[in-house]
Image (cartoon, helix red, strand yellow):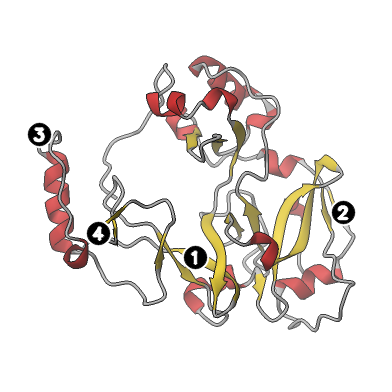
Amino acid sequence: MYQTFKVLATETVSHKALDADIYSAIPTEKVDGTCCYVTTYKGQPYLWARLDRKPNKLAEKRFKNFLHSKQNSKEFFWNVEEDFKPVPECWIPAKEIEQLNGNPMPDENGHIPGWVPVEKNNKQYCWHSSVVNYEFEIALVLKLHPDDSGLLEITAVPLSDLLEQTLELIGTNINGNPYGLGSKKHPLHLLIPHGAFQIRNLPTLKHSDLLSWFEGCREGKIEGIVWHCNDGCLIKVHRHHLGLCWPIPDTYMNSKPVIINMNLNKRDYAFDIKCLFHHFSKIDHQKFSRLKDIILDE
């Protein structure tokens, strides 16, 4: 929002990463979508969409002036009750946000990250709502097949199994669709739990080795890496940090075959014939050579 410069990775590992013991962290694929969260709403598990609370024009101007001044050794003072635009009553702040006197405090960008529940008929979040069914309390999830790490699986997962997890929503109408899912006529969206795609053959944390891995390795054809540290800290490197392009034509996610395993045989599901769950139940157990090849017909 306020950045007018590029952020590039340095040759050395940051103090933050060292303090979080990045060398024993689990590296995972950074997926290019929009962040979601599953928690309880109206007494049942619900999908929540990311909604950052942003400063009003006056506060934004003050904050910009502060960032551009040479007084950055001083701390910027926010009046949370007056400086921010209103949000819906159902909005909740993200868990990791610092609190001061009971108020969530903004991050370094001047935003207060948070969530709003995805209601079934809310047009603003129609792509979010396409991957959940609240009547049957299930979500449409893309993950690794439990018996074969070389195979992806699209499956219906009980929302209760995803409680308190964050996920990434990807698909036709999200972030320019870097993975080539669906089409304008038949949009396709899926949820991916954060940390779902662990990276097995990551090189050392040297700048040159990471650069070579992203450029020359099939597994490196991803948006970035997220290290999940033992203390809960997340360390991220994006291709852009290394001066590399994204999106790219042939992503690693599209190099693997995918199977449809809806797991819907335990009860009768009467889905709306236009919804994604109906379309996927029609092609249940089919295998495709890559995600891009899944075409949903009428």
Residue 225 shows up from this direction:
yes
Q: Residue 98: which disc?
A: none
Which amino acid type corresponds to the residue marked 1 in the rendered image? Ala
Q: Are marks 3 and 4 in contact (CB under 8 Å)?
A: no
Few, some or many C-alpha atoms within 10 Å of disc 4 (few <14, some 14-19, many ≥20)? few
The residue indicated by pointer 3 is 70
> Regarding mark 2 in the picture, which secondary structure is present there?
strand
Question: Mark 1 or mark 2: which is in front?
Answer: 1
Q: Which residue is mark 2?
A: 287
- Residue 254 in the image: x percent, y percent? 71, 44
**Which residue corresponds to mark 4?**
101
Between discs 1 and 2, the one toward the N terminus: 1
Badge 4 amino acid: Asn
Separation of marks 3 and 4 at Cα, in angstroms? 29 Å
How far apart are labels 3 and 1 at the CA level?
37 Å
Say which label, 3 or 1, has the lower sequence index. Answer: 1
Task: Give the image quarter of residue 56.
Answer: bottom left
